Image: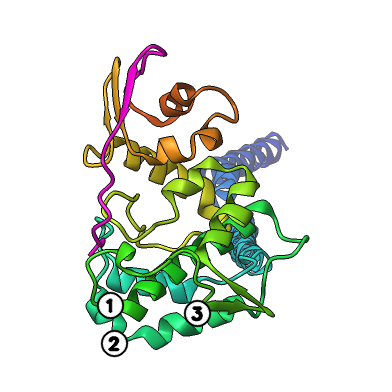
Amino acid sequence: MKHLILLALTAFLFSCSGAKKVIENSPKEQPKEIVASPVETTPEVVIETPIKVVETELEIETEEIIETADVIKHETIIANPETFNHEAWNSLLQDYVSDAGNVNYKDLKSNRKKLTNYIASLSDNMPNDTWKKEDKLAYWMNAYNAMTVDLILRNYPLQSIKDIKDPWDQRLWKLDNKWYNLEEIEHQILRKMDEPRIHFGIVCASFSCPKLQNEAFTASNLEMQLTNATREFLADKNRNIISKNTLKLSKIFKWFKKDFEQNGSLIDFLNTYSDISISEKANKSYLDYNWDLND
């Protein structure tokens, strides 16, 4: 009996020991490897995809905004044109007038038809009360200069505009139902618009006149054009000699003295556009006027 009990106990202990070894030798679970499995990389892909979509949408929206802005700017330019288009006159000035204001009358005479067509076009759209002052000034200054050039071509070749009988009194140009001359345009229209700088924009086809600008006057650029023409004329030592205490001026300042004194003295006007600070007590005299043709 004792042998049976001992045998049973030995078998039991042997069984428990084997089981223990089986358990100890079995592989352990590794939960961390599950965390590192490829499945967890999926959210990163999902996140990247919508980011790219958003960036693409923003790029498209930005391009649309830029294109829209360009369209708006273009429409604004079209919606605000000059009241009168002086491009035909501008083209002639570019082709036949130098930067110094010298006019190639000889070659221009062979293309006079283009000039007469421009003058005729002035009749189709004359200034009215709805026009701004700048539009009116540009219209009449361009008209005056174009008619002066046409007057020279009608009598070319010649040495001086004064070789023509009554050059400023001849009514040679019909606008609407009225015949105009240079005298009326200058004194009855332009001077009454209270802009003294017109005297540096309109030209009498002579050397001592301000130079003929080789671009047409336009309403949108008129302020800059008149300012530049005035400054240029005052700085030209062939037409004005200016120092602080001595002035040898163009006779334009003598003939149209009242025009330049609308808002102060003549010295005040000169100081506004001259690079030299002129004394109110400066001695004034006037240069001889050279009427030779500006060719």
Circle 2: element type: loop
Closest to the observer: 249 or 244? 249
- Contact check, label 3 and label 2, Cβ < 8 Å: no
Residue indicated by mark 3: 118
Q: Residue furthest right?
A: 129
Q: Of helix, strand and loop, which one carries label 1?
A: loop
Q: Amino acid at mark 3?
A: Tyr
**Protein image colouring:** rainbow
Does residue 43 appear left or right of residue 242 in this picture? right
- Residue under label 2, please give it: 110
Check disc 3: other Cα within 10 Å, few if <14, some if 14-19, many if 20+.
some
Q: Which residue appears at 44% of the width and 72% of the height?
A: 89
Residue 1: % across, % down: 73, 38
What residue sits right under mark 1 in the picture? 156
Three-letter amino acid code of the residue under disc 2: Ser
- Most foreground residue, 250 or 170: 170
Amino acid type for the residue under numbered disc 1 = Tyr
Mark 1 burial class by Cα count in 10 Å: few <14, some 14-19, many 20+: some
* Residue 60 in view: yes
Provide the residue span drawn in magenta.
276-295
